Image: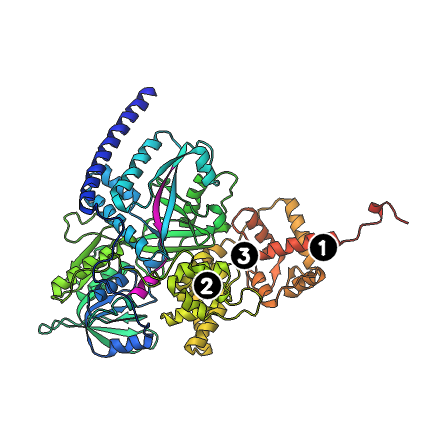
Amino acid sequence: MAFRKAVKGTALIGGGAIATVFGLSQFSQYRNKHGALVQVQAEEGAPVRKGHLPTREEQLLALQSGEEFDVLVIGGGATGCGCALDAATRGLKTALLERDDFSSGTSSRSTKLIHGGVRYLQKAIMNLDFEQYRMVKEALEERAHLLHSAPHLSAPLPIMLPIYKWWQLPYYWVGIKLYDLVAGSQCLKSSYVLTKARALELFPMLRKDKLVGAIVYYDGAWPLCPALLRGVDFGAETQAGAWRSCAGPLQLEGFRMCSQVSGVCGVPCRDVLAGKEFDVRAKCVINATGPFTDSVRKMDDQEVPNICQPSAGVHIVMPGYYSPDNMGLLDPATSDGRVIFFLPWEKMTIAGTTDSPTDVTSHPIPTEEDINFILSEVRNYLGADVEVRRGDVLAAWSGIRPLVTNPDSKDTQSLSRNHVVTISDSGLITIAGGKWTTYRAMARDTIDAAVREHGLRAGSCKTMGLQLEGAQDWSPTLYIRLVQDYGLESEVAQHLASTYGGKAFEVAKIAQVTGKRWPIVGKRLVSEFPYIEAEVVYGVKEYARTAVDIISRRTRLAFLNVQAAHEALPRIVDIMGRELNWCEQKKKEQLETAKTFLYYEMGYKVKTDQLTDSSEICLVPADIERYKKRFHMFDKDKKGFITILDVQRVLQSISVQIDENTLHEILNEVDLNKNGQVELNEFLQLMSAIQKGRVSGSRLAVLMKSAEEKLRRRQPIPVDRSGGGL
């Protein structure tokens, strides 16, 4: 045993020394090249954004005008918006098409993390893979740019790596220190080692037994894509001759080959909302469609080989008490060799991700298998006193990573997180692969290729250091002005400031008066989240045309709590209907579409499947008797079921008032056969599921237990128990 430890120690020290020398040499090279950099600086001539946001109708008119664009970008996710922003800031006439809501695909379904990739650096060193190393280095540089370009949206996040074996401490310490070194002057904060006691102090939910200590390093937290789109719309205002148009949902119908004389392509598309078809003319077309890369390439050339290998990644959201407010956790080696992040996000906890082959679809669905895998891995790192319950999964979603093989590479089987830019015989530029963190570098390489291939008149990339809309007027104390000037709740003001930056005042100005002493303005969509009705109006102004867009991207309700999103939907649809002049039929369609989205794509189905009419009742006889008595306190007539009238009668007897609509929602959560009543068997299935941890937060269960306790306290004391009396 001692010999094995000695061999392991020698190998560890030798490997660590080699890795350190490798890292130091690259760091030295980096410092020589960038030593003068203290922070990311804006490129000379980067435009200052001015002007108003064009309406969607104005954008469509520009697309239909027959004007010739320099660049037409297909795909309104992170990469597509990045390409449009890069092109517009170079002075190119730019158009952007998206067939759904902007960032509705992979871009909105990420881990909300901007990072270089600790595991990729490990692979680079272990396999002496310089390409992997270059990818990490580039990603770390881009991480610094993102933190600078949108300080209101992003922030450094400490991530803890728990250590449960002594030999892992120097091994992971060397790796994390190399991560710092590769970042060079762009290192957010230096990593450090924690003792067991200090690790538990900072992350009290952590499993204590066999814990040796922990290492903490820093990456960045990042939200969603609409802020990047705002940059597209304002990014080219001061560039001579540059203008842009972006619109969605617009369905791409195909390509018309470029004219040999003019070099202009005709791209037929259809306005999904109005059904109108028209052509958009452009000198250069860029395919930035993520998982749909190959389907667009085949519109251009049916014989082209596939380069995209889709991979599904599932995330779940759990209550905030599962993690500290400002400390993430990394599981570097799951039971099947994957990596799991466990991060605080929007006062909740996000856990993920999985990695499995999948078919390309516009509507990926999280599976129960993947959700349980993540929960199982989370249980391995949390203490025994923290019960990880399936019922605590508030939302779940699946996103499709567009991993690529380089068609120009000899090894066509290798999958990579690197990005690939290809040019077809007809001149179609395709950007594929990569990740959120490197969207700007991907866009730069893509527009560079477009300029070279199509002879476009444009300068060099100007997006390094370019701040996104809202960043210029933001400060960490901006929310205080929102509270003082408008009478917003502090939590709501902080949310607006961190989401819209300096543009938060535009949202506050249209916030409705509450009629209360405090807050003065800002009606919440749901009580437990800081999203207000004014954000729906503002979202419509920023091209939101579907209720799904509002609940999932303009606010994050669907990603944080599907039930809360479901409750907010009717009010959201009413506001959108008023702003967009929807008829009753249109409002009904939007409501049903959004409910379907929540049910299948955001985990509502797999959540409700935990309680079905075929759910097994696993209760001991004593518990069954106890729950029957509780049920019969509401079912006085021994009907075998309870209705809203039964619940109202009991609540009235204990002086509790709940409006009828809310009671309908509460009973509907448990009414498995949807007949407007809750049978005894359904109630017992609910209580069994709660005991097993498969359901949590049931309002009916809490309400009935609370009512039972109050009724018992109010029951008269029997004469024999009082000693007979007089």
**Which labelled disc corresponds to residue 613?**
3
Per the image, label 2 sits on a secondary structure element best described as: helix
Per the image, label 3 sits on a secondary structure element best described as: loop
The image shows residue 331, relative to residue 114, as above or below, that is above
The mark lying in front, picked from 2 and 3, is 2
For mark 2, what is the residue? 482
Q: Position of residue 537 (x, y in %)?
A: 43, 71
**Disc 2 to disc 1: CB gap under 8 Å:** no
Q: Is residue 559 magenta?
A: no
For mark 1, what is the residue? 711
Q: CA distance from mark 2 to mark 1?
A: 46 Å
Query: Nearest the camera: 91 or 407?
Result: 91
Image-quadrant location for residue 548: bottom left
Q: Quick check: 446 left or right of 174? A: left
Say what amino acid the circle numbered 2 marks.
Leu
Q: Position of residue 246 (x, y in %)?
A: 28, 70
Q: Quick check: 278 left or right of 726? A: left
Say what amino acid the circle numbered 3 marks.
Asp
Q: Please report the bounds of the magenta region as a residue range.
A: 215-231
Q: Is residue 304 visible?
A: no
Say what amino acid the circle numbered 1 marks.
Leu
Image-quadrant location for residue 109: bottom left
